[in-house]
Image (spheres, rainbow, N blue to C red):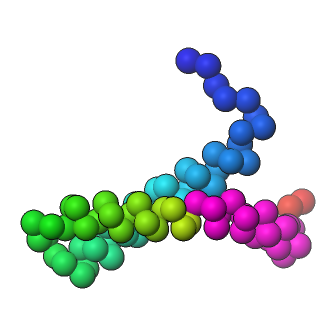
Amino acid sequence: MNKLPARYYKYALPLGTSFFMTFLVSGVATYRALGWDKKMFTTWMVSWVISWAIAAPTMYFVMPVVRRTLDRLIDQS
């Protein structure tokens, strides 16, 4: 299987991170709000898509700021 070129890393990292984090967090929040209800899965998926649509672009713009801040705060030697 061919790999993507390295130039796509800056797009793939925030997309992948936001994908999994919003999936898990929205699932926990939906479960806490509804319990194991018949509508839980459908409600979870709707909530997840909305949260991912917000989180993915946010991660794309925030991640470089967080990296620069951490580079200033953490000794890399």
Residue 13 visible? The answer is yes
**Residue at point 78% right, 63% down?**
64
In the image, taking residue 21 as reference, residue 28 lies left or right, namely left
Q: Is residue 58 magenta?
A: yes
State which quadrant residue 23 falls in.
Answer: bottom left
The mark total stands at 0
Q: Is residue 38 magenta?
A: no
**Residue at point 10% right, 66% down?**
38
In the image, taking residue 73 as reference, residue 1 lies left or right, namely left
List x then y, in percent, for residue 76. 86, 61
| Residue most extreme to the top | 1
List x then y, in percent, for residue 53. 51, 62
In the image, taking residue 65 as reference, residue 53 lies left or right, namely left
Q: Which contiguous range is marked in magenta?
A: 56-75
List x then y, in percent, for residue 32. 25, 79
**Residue at point 39% right, 63% down?**
48
In the image, taking residue 20 as reference, residue 43 lies left or right, namely left
Of residue 31 and residue 76, the one placed in the foreground of this image is: 31
